[in-house]
Each structure stands twice: as C-alpha cells, then as structure tokens.
Amino acid sequence: MSIPSRVKIVEVGPRDGLQNEKEPVPAAIKVELVHRLQDAGLKEIEVTSFVSPKWVPQMGDNAEVMAGIQRRSDVRYSVLTPNLKGFEAAVPTQPHEIVVFGAASEAFSQKNINCSIAESIERFRPVVQQAVEQGIAVRGAISCAVGCPYEGDIAPERVELVARLMRDIGVQHVGVADTIGVGTPNRVQRALEAALKHYSVNEVSGHFHDTYGMALANTLASLQLGIWHFDTSVAGLGGCPYAKGATGNVATEDVVFLLHGMGIETGIDLDKLVDAGKFISDFLGRKPNSRAATALLNKRANAAS
Ligand code: HMG
Ligand code: MG
C-alpha cells in the first residue's frame, strides 16, 4: 500500500478539544475558533455535541454555537448525537454529518453513554436511519480501540465486532479511536485492520489522543495502511471527561507539519492554523500543546526581535 498523496483532516478541537474544559468557554469564543479554523483551510469541522448537558456541561450551548457560525459552502460541519433526542435537537442546526459514538470496551460504553455496546447499537439504529433518510452523512466513533481506562488492553476482534455492528445499521464511515493514547504503531495497525474488514480504506479514519506521545507515530503507521482521514485537534486541546488522565487529541499543527513535510496535501495553511491555536490557547490561559506550533511561534518571536 502506498502512502496517500492527500489527507483529509477533521478538526475536532471545538468539540473533543473543548468538551473537557472545566471553566465555561463562551459560545462566541467557540464560534470565533470555528471561523479561524475555516480561514486556515479546514474543510471538516466537528463543532459540538448534542449530549446531555448534565453529562457534559461544556457542550450545553450546542445550538447557539451552530447558529453563530458563518458557514462556508466548501466546509462540512459535524456534530455528535448519542441518541434520538440528541439527533432531533441537532437536525434544526443543519449539520452535514452526525457522529454516533460507541466503544470497543463494555466498561467504557457504560461510563460514557450509560449503556452496553449492544444497547448502544440499538440506540444508534433509528438515528442512523433517520439521518440517512434526511441526507445527513453518518460517521461512527469506536472508542477504546486499543486500550480502555477500565478494562486495559482491547483485542482487535472487539473493534471488528463494533465495526461490523456499525456497518449493519448503516454507519457510513468509522473512526478508530485511541481514546487514552496508549496505542503504539503495531497495535494501532491491528485495530485499523479490524475496522478495514468491514469498511474500505476510504471509510476509516484515525482518531488518536496523544497521552503517551505516540499519536504522530500512529498517524504514520496509519498512512502506511493507506488511511487518509484523521481527526485532530488544534493546539492539542481535549480529552474525554469519561477517560480520566487521557490528554488531548494529536495537535492539528503537528499532523499538518508531518504531512506537508512528507509532501502530502492537506489544503491547510499552517501559519493561519497556528494563529487559530494561539487564539484559543490565549483564551484558555495556556500555551498550545503542539510542538510544531511552539516552534513556529518561537521562530516568529525570534524574527521579530
Ligand atoms: P442517560 O442519563 O442514560 O439518558 O444518558 P436518559 O435517556 O436516561 O435521559 C436522562 C436525562 O437526560 C433526561 O432528562 C433526558 O431528557 C436527558 P431529564 O428527564 O432527567 O431532565 N437527555 C438528553 N439531554 C440532551 N441531549 C441528549 C439527551 N439524551 C438524554 N442527547 C446519554 C445517556 C447518552 C444522554 C449520556 O450518557 C450522555 O450525554 N453521554 C455523553 C458523554 C459524552 O459526551 N462523552 C464525550 C464524547 S465521546 C468522546 O469524546 C470520544 C470520541 O472523541 C472518540 C474517542 O476519543 O474515543 C468521540
Ligand atoms: Mg476523542
């Protein structure tokens, strides 16, 4: 399999990135972040999630954020919908794509969405059916695809099972998610290969949290399998509130630096992306959690002095 010449990035910073922030981030800041990301050339943005505000208060402004975005016709906006209630609330906000999120680990499924894997599939079934009927694309996330904070190592067969169940109910694309960032390249490749038993290489993405610093290596390992869709988060923001100790997604800036360095096209302007990351990091009162962003910001500061 040759390395892809082009990669599609789904920017998940506004959703996965901000969902775990303890202090409320105003909707206007989230909207401004989305605007800056689309100005930087991101064509797919995961904006928010229609989950219970009791479970994830930070996403309680979902409809307000969706309404505040000045949309571009060449950008697709996606949202998470765990059940019909979330889907029905999401539809009026006109997402291009919805994401149902399950897990390869029973314990994580219980902690994150309060039901078993089998029950989650039954909850997703009508959501997927209605989305497809309404022309809304459907992505599925498979959390804990290599390791689980409660169950430890997860076998590829578990990923294959969830991929098969998602395929059966009509999910069009699956994300293989290393929720707690414990994956190393070989194990991530096994998890991806499990999903590839039921989905084509054009229908599988990598979603890597960087807790142990393995996410770039895992991105390269995925490219070696021909995978060309990745979820990444500007400034490395993020983490799942139900995966304690897990840090953010791999930084979009770092992945873009890697890809451009390999001659792989993304359509993203790295300088503008660094600005977007700095904008949200300044708001949160911290430095971007991205080596590439840090290096480029230092370079700018040195050039100015
Ligand atoms: P539940 O408590 O079992 O739900 O939660 P329920 O159906 O029993 O309803 C209980 C209450 O919640 C009711 O309200 C419902 O109306 C309300 P009450 O009558 O008590 O006032 N409710 C909702 N409200 C708003 N939106 C909804 C909704 N559904 C029910 N959609 C539920 C089940 C799935 C809702 C809950 O567990 C939940 O919201 N979980 C979401 C957790 C979450 O967002 N996690 C982070 C995203 S996943 C992630 O980050 C992983 C990913 O990045 C990939 C990776 O890295 O692994 C995607
Ligand atoms: Mg995630």
Image (cartoon, rainbow, N blue to C red):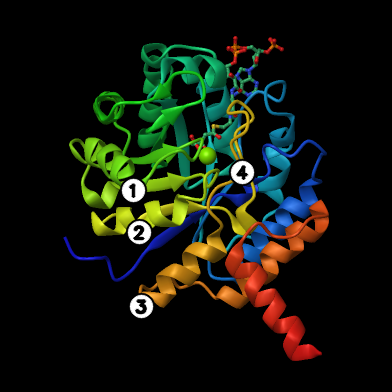
Residue labelled with disc 3: 263
Q: Nearer the viewer, mark 1 or mark 2?
A: 1
- Label 1: state its secondary structure: helix
Sooner in the amino-acid sequence: mark 3 or mark 2: 2
**Is 180 on the left-hand or right-hand side of 24?**
left
- Residue 19 occupies which quadrant of the picture? top right
Q: Amino acid at mark 3?
A: Gly
- Residue 62 occupies which quadrant of the picture? top right
Marker disc for residue 185 = 1
Q: Badge 4, how many Cα within 10 Å: few under 14, some, many 20+?
A: many
Residue labelled with disc 2: 220
From the viewer's side, name the closer residue of 90 and 193.
193
From the viewer's side, name the closer residue of 49 and 266.
266
- Real-space CA distance between mark 1 and mark 2, rounded to the nearest whole angstrom: 8 Å
Q: Is residue 130 above or below residue 64?
A: above
Residue labelled with disc 4: 15
Q: Residue 159 at x, y = what percent?
A: 30, 29
Sooner in the amino-acid sequence: mark 2 or mark 4: 4
